[in-house]
Amino acid sequence: MVANLTTPLIGIVSTTAIGRLGDAALLGGVAMASVIFDCLFWLFAFLRMSTVAFTAQSLGSGEVQELCAILVRGFIVAGIIGSGLIALQMPLAGILLEAMGGSEGVTRAAKTYFTIRIWSAPFALANYVVLGWLIGQARAKLALTTQVAINVINALATVLLVLVFKAGIAGAAIAAVLAEASGLLIGVVIARHLSDGGLALPWARLLDRAKLMRMLTVNRDIMIRTAALITVWLFFAAQGARTGDVTLAANAVLNNFLLVSAFFLDGLANAAEQLCGRAYGARDRVSFSGATRLVILWGMVFALAVAAVFALLGPVLIDVMTANEQVRHDARLYLIFVSVSPLLAVFAFGFDGVYIGATWARDMRNLMVASLVIFFGAWLALRPFGNAGLWGALLVHYAARGGLEALRYPAMLRASFRS
C-alpha cells in the first residue's frame, strides 16, 4: 500500500510546485498534462497487472524458472510501446489537448509539459513491469524502495528546477523524466540481484507460443477494461476544463486526493493480485476465498481511515497545494465528494485485484464497459447540477464497478475451482 501510495506523487509534486507560483493557468496546464499522463500510462497498466498475476501464478504452480522470462517479456513490450508513444508525440499532444478543451493559456502550458515528459514513457512503462514482478513475488519492501527512490528524486529535482532555478513547467517535466529513468536503473539492479545476474534468456523460452498468446489475450482484455476506466477520467477532466480555469484547477487539486485514495486502496488490490494469483496457480480454493475476504475487510477499514483524513485535513491540504483563493474556495465546495469516494471505491479496487490475480480478464473487461455506460447515464441525469453533478456521476461509477464485480464473483469462483 505504501509503495502504491508513492505512485501519484510525480503529478502531485509537479502540481504543488507550480501551484505555489499562484498562476491558475500554469496550475491548470500542469494539472491537465498530469491527468493526460496518468491516463496515457495507465492505459498500459496491464504491464503491471498481468506481470503480478503471471508471476504469482508461476510461484503457486511451482514454475519458478519462468519468472525471469515474464520480466524480460514485459521489458520488451514496454520498450516497444514507449518508443511508439515518443514517435507519435505530436499528433498525440494535439488530439489529447484539444479533447481536454482548456483555455489557450492552459493548453500552451500543458503542451510544454507534455512534449518533455513523453520522453519518460519507456522508463515509466518498464517501471510498471518491475513493480508488478516484485509484487508478484510478494517482495513489497523492494517495490517500496524502488517507488520511494523514484519519488524522492522527482521531488528534489522538481524543487530545484521549478522553485530554485525558475525553470517553470518545463522544469517539472524534466524532473519527471529524470526520476523515471533513475527508477528503472534501480529496478534492473534489483532484478539482476534476485536473478543472480541472469536476465539473459534464450529466445525459444521468451517466444514460447502458448505463454505469449495467453499474455497477449489477458493484456488485451485488461487494456480494454483500462480504456473504459480512462474514458471516465478524461471525460471528468474535460468537463471540468469547459467550466473555466478556476474549476479545472479546483478539480485538479481534488483529483490529487482521489489519486492518493485510489493508489492507497490499490495497494490492497495488489495484495489480492498476489495472494489470489498464487492460490489460483496452486488450485487452492480455500486460500483464494480467504484472501478475497481479507482484502475486502481490510479495505473497508482503510477506506474509513482515508475518508476521515480527507474530511478533517482536506481544507488544510487544499491550502498547501494552491495559493489561489478562488481555487481554494471552489475546491472546498466539492471536498465532500472526495471524502465519500473511498467508501464506494473499496469494493471496486478489491475485486479488481481478485479478478486480475485469477486472470478473469474477459469478465472484468465486460463489467467495466457496463460501468462506463452507467456513468454516462448518471452524468446525463445529474447534468443540471453542474460540477456537483459531475462529481456525483463519478461516485455512481465507483459503486457500479464494485457492485457488478461482487455480483459476478460467486459464479466465477465456482467455474474456476470445479472439482
Image (cartoon, rainbow, N blue to C red):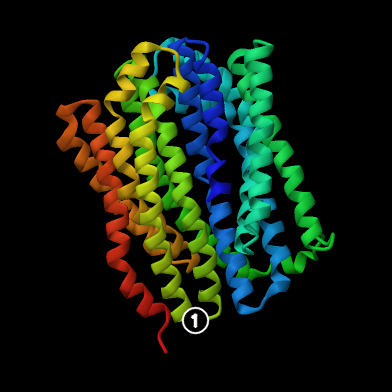
Residue 235 appears in the picture as rendered: no
Give the percent coordinates (x, y) of residue 16: 52, 22
Describe residue 317's horizontal placement relative to residue 171 as left or right. Answer: left
Q: Extreme front residue here?
A: 312
Q: Farthest bottom residue?
A: 419
Residue 279: percent from left, percent from top: 52, 75
The image position of residue 211, as x and y in percent, is 62, 69
Seen from the viewer's position, the closer of residues 33 and 207 is 33
The answer to whether residue 162 is above or below residue 285 is above
Asked if residue 320 is positioned above or below residue 301 in the image, the reply reads above
**Residue, x 51% and y 29% (percent of image)?**
34
Q: How packed is label 1: few (under 14 Cα within 10 Å), some, or many (20 or more)? A: some
Task: Name the foreground residue: 241 vs 206.
Answer: 241
Residue type for callout 1: Asp
Residue drawn at point x = 63 percent, y = 28 percent: 155
Front one among 355 and 165 = 165
> Of all residues shown, which one is farthest toward the right?
197
Q: Quadrant of the C terminus?
A: bottom left
Up-down: is 368 above or below 333? below
Which residue does the image show at 43% across and 11% down from the upper left?
104
Decide if residue 143 is in sight here: yes
Q: Circle 1 sits in a helix, a strand or a loop, which is it?
A: loop
Instruction: Judge from the rendering whether residue 124 lies leftward or rightward of residue 413; answer left or right.
Output: right
Task: Give the left or right position of residue 398, taking residue 274 as reference.
Answer: left
| Residue 261 located left or right of residue 271 | left
Q: Which residue bears the numbered disc 1? A: 284
Residue 159 position, x and y percent, is: 64, 20
